Amino acid sequence: HFELNNCELKLSGEIKSIIENTYPGFEIWERNDFAFDCGKTSDTYECNAHQSPNSVIGDFNGDTIIDVVLNGHNTKNDLIIALISENNSYSVIDVSKKDLSDPKHKLPNQLGSEVGIWIYLSHQPPGKIKSPYENNTLDLKTDAFQIIYCGKASTLYYWNKNKFEEYAISD
């Protein structure tokens, strides 16, 4: 259903249809939409089989079927959505919904005069995670992902009892 190669994500027709039914007009941000220091080039972001600035592939819910998180937009909103495997199909889960960004506008002041999308994704494999912003160490049993607010903060999202929970990584 999903293939990530050289920072390019390929979705099956079935997955595209599921997304279109939930968010008509949804488009994944292109690599060139991202700001230079926020995932646009290989100097600032390492793409691999699990991650690109606009998508993360992994088994988030622990059912051994690959899921995907997408960073994109429709005509009204910036959207980060997950497609989670469920009963031989996929359900769309809203992760984040904000007012629509324009990739040609300047970034927040601390990032200088650069233009582009400044919120990107990264993959987190299972394992123990310790953050100075949380009281407890997190023991991830499945894949997870981070939403990174370039130059500001990042939050880890992990699946727990049929929903994503948040864990602060940086501020």
Image: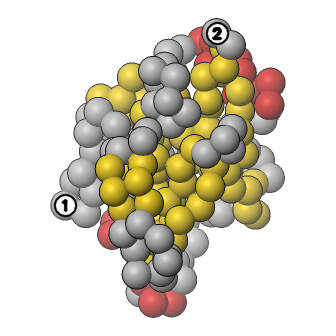
Residue 31 shows in the view: no
Q: Earlier in the sequence, mark 2 or mark 1?
A: 1
Vertical relation: 22 (above or below) 89: below
x%, y% of residue 160? 61, 45
Vertical relation: 73 (above or below) 12: below
Residue 97 shows in the view: yes
Q: Disc 1 marks which amino acid?
A: Asp
Which is nearer the eye, 112 or 170? 170
x%, y% of residue 42? 22, 54
Residue 97 located left or right of residue 110: right
Vertical relation: 88 (above or below) 97: above
Which is nearer the eye, 126 or 17? 126
User: Residue placed farthest to the left in the image?
Assistant: 43
What residue would you read off at disc 1? 43
Residue 155 located left or right of residue 74: left
x%, y% of residue 35? 41, 65
Residue 3: quarter of image: top left
User: Residue placed farthest to the bottom in the image?
Assistant: 110
Give me the residue at 80% from left, 52% from top.
Answer: 76
Give me the residue at 62% from left, 31% from top.
Answer: 83
x%, y% of residue 33? 47, 55
Residue 104: quarter of image: bottom right
Give me the residue at 29% from left, 33% from top.
Answer: 49
Q: Disc 2 marks which amino acid?
A: Asn
What residue would you read off at disc 2? 88
Give me the residue at 51% from left, 89% from top.
Answer: 109
Disc sitting over residue 56 in the figure: none
Q: Which is more foreground, mark 2 or mark 1?
A: 2
Q: Residues within 10 Å of mark 2 (few under 14, many from 20)?
A: few
Which is nearer the eye, 154 or 99? 154
For label 1, the SS is: loop
